Image (cartoon, coloured by chain):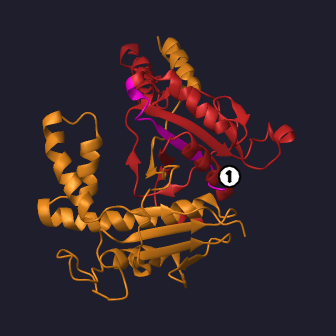
Chain colours: A red, B orange
Amino acid sequence: MAKFNKKKDGDLPAVSTASLPDIVFMLLFFFMTVTVMKDSSLMVDNILPNASEIKKLEKKDRVIYIYVGKPTSQYQKVFGTEPKIQLNDKFANVSEVGDYILQERAKKPQELQNVLTTALKVDKNANMGLISDIKQQLREVNALKINYTTFEGDAFRNLQ
Amino acid sequence: MADIAFLLLIFFLVTTTIETDAGLDRMLPPMEPPEDNVVIKQKNIFTVNINKNGQLLVEEELLDLKGLRKAAMDFLDNGGDGTCNYCKGARDESSSDNPTKAIISLKNDRETQYSTYITVQNELVGAYNELRNREAQRLFNRNFTEMEAEYLNPETPSRIREELKDKVKQIQDLFPQKLSEAQTSTN
């Protein structure tokens, strides 16, 4: 009667992994579509503030980025803990901002040079003094269109 | 198969970031001052001062940040001289004459925290947006912010964009955004 022996209870069949590649590919395509390549590694803390009345920055090729914030822990020994400006891959002084904008502007095609936006990615704990100095520099090189990059959210959360 | 896919997945996780690419758009004033010296009446200026502790002084009075949007809207929507036929404000003689003449002046300390400044900016832009939304609802039955987003989106067909351009301009002219930022004070 061995033919009719029941399988022992508790002997579960192994979970099929046949669909694993499909799942992983799905994840892969998700990340490929929603993310972009890093263009510069951040050397400053950059937790942006929240705002609700935001506008989307269209057309990436028309944007120049300026990062401001406290140097991250690995740079704090050399650069201290006061908020600094990061342009491309290095720290810079306020006086270098104008030259940087002119340089970046010269790299862009002629027809875009007048419609560039400067995106200020500033850490929420920075002081306005530094930002005012940057704004003054931007005015001097006539880069008047700026965008304070923020997360979308309730602006009153900034105050906590 | 799964191994290869995992490898690719991890590569993309490491080398890419999710970009934040939205924020508050602002225009800086040009370097050269305007030629003619226009005299602006004091009652048409709404002054906002932020001190280094993040406290607000609005029109010479201490104000909580939560009340700023309401105060700015009341000021813009006032229509004191009666020439503004779409205003729904109090028509107070001592406040602004007309939304097209009303100016908000923002001043901050060098020690002010950036997040406080952004909150104030957000509230002031919010005040303009709420008033513009109201007018857009009245004229075109849709929100101004939505119309503007569609107008600025490069994927919108150009035919619709042309149509929106005039409408957006019309609403913007009803409540022009006049937000002036003076030099930061040092003390």
Question: Where A137 falls versus B18 (above or below)?
Answer: below
Q: Residue at x 42, y 72 (%)?
A: B39
Q: Viewed as shown, does residue B123 lie left or right of A104?
A: left
Q: In which quarter of the view is residue B133 placed?
A: bottom left
Percent position of residue B173, x then y:
25, 60
Percent position of residue B27, x then y:
45, 51
Between B29 and A22, the one nearer to me in the picture: B29
Q: Secondary structure at mark 1?
A: helix
- How many numbered dots are placed on residues in this image? 1
> Please, what is the three-letter code of the amino acid marked with disc 1?
Leu
Report if residue A135 lies within the magenta region.
no
- Read off the chain for label 1: A
Between A36 and A6, the one nearer to me in the picture: A36
Q: In which quarter of the view is residue B111 placed?
A: bottom right
Question: Where A90 falls versus A124 (above or below)?
Answer: above
Q: Which residue is mark 1?
A: A130
Percent position of residue A76, x then y:
82, 42
Asked whether the viewer can see residue A6, the reply is: no
Q: Residue at x 52, y 67 (%)?
A: B106
Magenta-highlighted residues: A111-125
Asked whether the viewer can see residue A142, the reply is: yes
Q: Residues within 10 Å of mark 1 (few under 14, many from 20)?
A: some
Q: Residue furthest front?
A: B36
Report if residue A117 lies within the magenta region.
yes
